[in-house]
Amino acid sequence: MKKKYATFIALLTSILFIVIGLIKGQNASVLAKAVKICLECIGIG
């Protein structure tokens, strides 16, 4: 029974942080960093 509550709380917490990040506009920053890292890995950037 405790495992169900822990899973539910973890799910709600992750959704909350995702929503906060979207409200603050962090999705564009994360995408830009991901593209930069990806280009560095293949040797272009």
Image (spheres, rainbow, N blue to C red):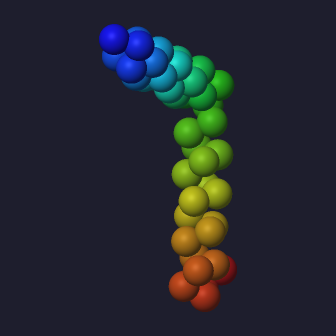
Quadrant showing the N terminus: top left
- In the rendering, at what x and y percent does residue 33 appear? 64, 57
Q: Residue furthest bottom?
A: 43
Could you tell me if residue 36 is visible in this image? yes
Count all numbered tags in the image, as a single digit: 0
Q: Residue at x 54, y 85 (%)?
A: 42
Could you tell me if residue 8 is visible in this image? no
Q: Residue at x 48, y 22 (%)?
A: 10
Decide which of 39, 10 is in the foreground and name it: 10
Q: Residue at x 55, y 51 (%)?
A: 31
Quadrant in the picture for residue 25:
top right
Decide which of 32, 5 is in the foreground and name it: 5
- In the rendering, at what x and y percent does residue 5 appear? 40, 12
Quadrant in the picture for residue 38:
bottom right
Give the answer, above or below, for where 29 lies relative to 16.
Answer: below
Decide which of 14, 44 is in the foreground and name it: 14
Give the answer, above or below, for where 7 lies relative to 34.
Answer: above
Quadrant showing the C terminus: bottom right
Left/right of residue 32 with respect to residue 18 in the rendered view: right
Quadrant in the picture for residue 24:
top right
Give the answer, above or below, for where 37 lies relative to 25.
Answer: below
- In the rendering, at what x and y percent does residue 2 appear? 41, 13
- In the rendering, at what x and y percent does residue 4 appear? 34, 16
